[in-house]
Image (cartoon, rainbow, N blue to C red):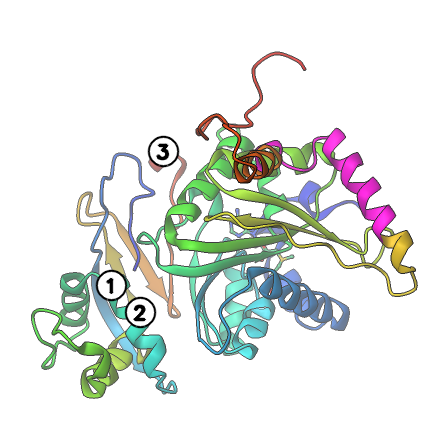
Amino acid sequence: MSKRPEHQAPPEVYYGVDEARKYTQNSRIIEVQEKCTERALELLTLPDDQSCLLLDLGCGSGLSGEAITDQGHMWVGMDISSSMLDVAMDREVEGDMLLADIGNGVPFRPAMFDGAISISAVQWLCYSDSAAHKPAKRLYRLFMTLFASLARGSRAVFQFYPENDAQVELIVSQAMRAGFTGGLVVDYPNSTRAKKIYLVLMTGGGTLPRGLQDQNESGSLQAQYQRRERMKQIRSGKVPKRAWIMHKKERRRKQGKEVRRDSKFTGRKRSGRF
Amino acid sequence: MLTSKGIKNVKEGFPLKIQADEVKNVDIDFDQDFISKMVPKLDWNALIFAAQCVGHKEDLPDTLPEGYENDEDLLRKLHHILLEVEVINGCLECPETQRKFPISNGIPNMLLNEDEV
Ligand SMILES: C[S@@+](CC[C@H](N)C(=O)[O-])C[C@H]1O[C@@H](n2cnc3c(N)ncnc32)[C@H](O)[C@@H]1O
């Protein structure tokens, strides 16, 4: 297996002139970026027949941005690689772009955006490229400032490539800490090639949609599989605990039972193991 | 829309002063609904300030008039200033620290140094 890009160099170096140029000339990359963006937009559940303003985190060469434009929305993109942004500029994409490190937060006024997406980028924040880089802190800063810049009730969807479960846990826990609810949606979980992981974050509650399944699976098997996967995920802590607790509380509330007030500590791990 | 709040110790970081050395006008289709949805999210004074910075104050009113949703003429002007006037080269300046963020090739560079975060 080839070494992960994240191990090779910081993103602004890895996505240098050559990689940036190659990026938009590879038909498989183009297709994956497009497909993932379309799915992320679907998961945003934007209102129909309305043009929305979206934020694209790690917008790179603008492949994801073009898929946003194709769906009739406007976008603002952020990326840390000037070479990738130059490629986007050369390709005359329609969004406005900023050269910025999303690990330092998003620099926008409150409630500007109707939604945010990020395609294949956020796992980069799990690595520290200097002594001053603290992954948890940078992720928290991203999610906290993102939460503020989203209109209430809107969502953010991150498709990403975690290297291991610890990264999933790190990313999800920082998002929940910043006030989001939601969790993971995994499409085609049993295909190595087609499997895609989306973190669906909500600012105003809502239920988590289901992941897509391979077409050749039978319905009942699918359901069984999903239930089993879900239990596995809960046990392994992949489904954010806070979301899970909020969900349970909501159910109890509906049944007219008394539940503890939600606080920013809801579902947070207490210190100490287990 | 942008702030420099990311810098350590900056409280508001808004509005950023725009210095426009090179401006380009582009054509973008007018979408009345999109613009009127955008208006309440904007700080009117900051918008006027930004328009002045790039030399497009023109006859924009000093306060947001009521019934702007149906004022196509005004919405068209806003569309132009918000979407069609692009600063290609110049810079953005933080109102509190005077830190400058260069804009080149139409892209503002908001990267911060390690000692600024
Ligand atoms: C796999 S590429 C995806 C590109 C993009 N979605 C597109 O359509 O071209 C990942 C992108 O994330 C960006 N990235 C990685 N770390 C980042 C950070 N800390 N801040 C901003 N962008 C980052 C990289 O520069 C790269 O362009």
The stretch of residues the image draws in magenta is A223-243
User: Which residue is more in the foreground, A57 or B32?
Assistant: B32
Disc 3 from disc 2: Cα separation: 35 Å
Q: Is residue A114 visible?
A: yes
Q: Chain of mark 1?
A: B
Amino acid marked by disc 1: Leu
Give the mark nearer the N terminus: 3 vs 1: 1
Whether disc 1's CB lies below 8 Å from ligand 1 is answered no
Report whether A92 appears left or right of A14: left
Amino acid marked by disc 3: Asp
Q: What quarter of the picture does the C terminus of chain A occupy?
A: top right
Disc 1 from disc 2: Cα separation: 7 Å
User: Which residue is more in the foreground, A3 or A76?
Assistant: A76
| Magenta-drawn stretch contains A34 | no
Q: From the top left corner, tell me how far across and down residue A81 is, in percent.
A: 53, 56
The label nearer to you, 3 versus 2, is: 2
Examine the image and state in which quarter residue A268 appears. Answer: top right
Report whether A134 appears left or right of B54: right
Residue occupied by mark 1 = B42
Residue occupied by mark 3 = B115
Q: Residue furthest left?
A: B62
Examine the image and state in which quarter residue A222 appears. Answer: bottom right
Label 1, residues with CA under 10 Å away: few <14, some 14-19, many ≥20: some
Residues at circles 3 and 2 in contact by the CB criterion of under 8 Å: no
Residue occupied by mark 2 = B38
